[in-house]
Image (tube, rainbow, N blue to C red):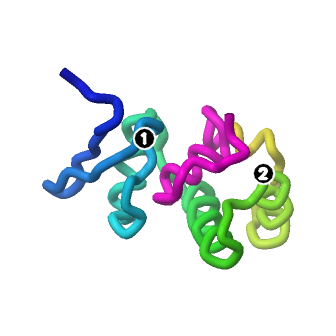
Amino acid sequence: MNDPENQRARVSGHDIDLDVDGHLRHADAWSEALAECLARQDGVVLEPLHWWVIHFVRAHQRDYGMPPLMRTIVSEMRRQTDCDDASSRTLYRLFPDGPVRMACRYAGLPRPESCI
C-alpha cells in the first residue's frame, strides 16, 4: 500500500524521501539528477531556461530565506537571459502546474507558503 506521507524518488540507485507534495524532505539530498527525475515523472524535459529558473530559485532561497515571487523571476529572466518572451506565460509553458511551486520542487526546496 502506498503511503502518501512517505513518497520516494529513486535516483542513481538511491531512494530519496519526499513529502506529501513531492518536495524533498531533506534539502541536502538535492542534485540535478533528482531534478531531472522529478521533472521526468511530470512529463517535463528540463532545458536551459528551466535550469536557469531552478538555479535562480535556489539562489534566491539561499540569499533571502524564501522563494521568489513569480514577478521577481520574470523580471530577472528579462535582465539575465536572452529569452525573447520573458513573461508569466513563458513560465507556465516551462512549468505548467504552477511555475514557482514546480521550480521549487525541482530545486529541492519546500513548497512555497504562497502556494495553495
Between the C-alphas of marks 2 and 1, the distance is: 20 Å
Q: Looking at the image, which residue is at 80% across and 67% down?
A: 76
Name the amino acid type tagged 1: Gly
The reply to whether the magenta stretch includes residue 65 is no
Q: Looking at the image, which residue is at 48% across and 39% down?
A: 44
Tag nearer the camera, 2 or 1: 1
Reading the image, the residue beneath label 1 is 22
10 Å crowding of disc 2: few (<14), some (14-19), many (20+): some
Q: Looking at the image, which residue is at 67% across and 64% down?
A: 66
Percent of width and height locating residue 41? 37, 36
- From this viewpoint, which residue is outermost toward the top? 1
When the figure is inspected, residue 80 is found, relative to residue 83, above or below; the finding is below
Reading the image, the residue beneath label 2 is 70
Q: Could you say whether the residue bearing mark 1 is in a helix, strand or loop?
A: loop
The span shown in magenta is 93-116
Would you say 82 lies left or right of 34 here? right
| 68 and 81: which is toward the camera | 68
Name the amino acid type tagged 2: Met
Q: Looking at the image, which residue is at 81% across and 56% down?
A: 74
